[in-house]
Amino acid sequence: MVVTRRADGSVLEAIGYVELAGKLRQSILNGEIGVGEILPSNKQLAATHGVAPETARRAAKQLEAEGLVASEPRQGFRVLARVNDPERGLPIAFVLGGAEKTELWDDFSRMLFACLQQAAADRGWSMLAIGIGGRSPAQIMEQLRDCRACGMVLDVAKPELLAEVGRVRLPAVMMDAWSPEMSLDAVVQDSFQGAMAATKHLLACGHRRIAWLGRISESVQSQERYGGVAAALAAAGVEFRPEYMRDTPWPETPAAARRLLSLGERPTAVLGLWHDAAAELAAAAGELGLSLGRDLELVGWCTEELYGGAYSASFRGSVPPTMVWSIAELARLTIVRLAERRARPEMPPTLIKVPVRLRPAEKGKS
């Protein structure tokens, strides 16, 4: 330890930078200085601990070398989320864009969380579920700091929330959502590949009047599915008919399905690449006296885990060909990527896609 004395000979510095770094490290690990917070300035540390500002600076640089804090220009040293370790029982937060209360989540959201819990448990990690509800990004991040979350999985691509996550440098992976700006890692269904495969299936069955029912502008994944359909039709030289390819938000789906199947030259096949779209198409076909598989070919979209429940129950006679994908695989890859992100925060963001496969038509519930 280098001792600094005042002009009168009294000792100014009582501890060295190694000791000060140890005190700060303990405060960080105990949660007294939270993740995302800025360390006190060198001047403040010097006054509080009776050290020279240079000693305070060296202590902060020591913590930076250990990966506990990161220097930010004109800000100071910010505490990084890696100080909160899931191996010590601290949770990974699943931030869901739906209702704040988990009892209001739908079956899909509950399945997402259950699969995440299992994937995390396989590593000995715990999960905490948080619904965004009407809260601001700052309020969400404050809750994560209070519970000392050591990582985050989120299913929304709200720019203001992504910006807040980036500001506090919390290790985070988007699950079943992604942003074209690629500010975070994302693990998603391969919507483009799945939609392309669904369209190729209908083309191989001889259909040329192929329609689409569902949203387009709602999300990036919606646009990917629409893009996969358009690409497959273009590659086959099949006309892209505007009256068959309209952006249909969910509230308009039932009426849009009936209008589509009542056209003078109605489509012979329709892509309902969402559970609700496929169900509404089947209902509209029944009302109009059309038989699925004979008068109209339909391809739906569902998860493997939910296929045998409410999805299959939406159809009578038989369940149409359906594009399926695994929530469990999505969750496993999400946790794997989050572990990699915690270990190597400097990695560039990556988009990981879970394959979608065609499940043939099956006999349904009568």
Image (spheres, grey):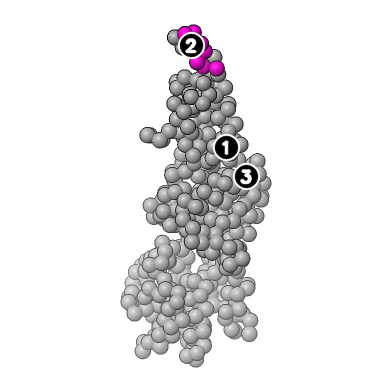
Residue 12 image offset from top left, x and y in percent: 50, 15
Residue 296 seen anywhere in this rendered image of the structure: yes
The answer to whether residue 83 is left or right of residue 244 is right
- On residue 91, the disc is none
Mark 2 near mark 3, Cβ–Cβ under 8 Å? no
Count how many numbered circles sit on residues in the image: 3
Helix, strand or loop at label 2? It is: loop
Q: Which residue is mark 3?
A: 90
Is residue 347 or residue 46 the one in the foreground?
46
Residue at x-position 44% and y-position 57%: 157
Residue at x-position 55% and y-position 49%: 144
Q: Main secondary structure of the magenta part?
A: loop
Q: CA distance from mark 3 to mark 1?
A: 15 Å
For the N terminus, which image quadrant? Answer: top right
- On residue 32, the disc is 1
Is residue 202 or residue 22 the one in the foreground?
22
Chain-order first, disc 2 or disc 1: 2
Residue 312 image offset from top left, x and y in percent: 60, 76
| Residue 238 figure quarter | bottom left
Chain-order first, disc 2 or disc 3: 2
Amino acid marked by disc 2: Arg
Helix, strand or loop at label 3? It is: loop
Q: Is residue 106 above or below residue 264?
A: above
Residue at x-position 54% and y-position 64%: 99
Q: Which residue is mark 2?
A: 5
Start and end of the magenta stretch? 8-14
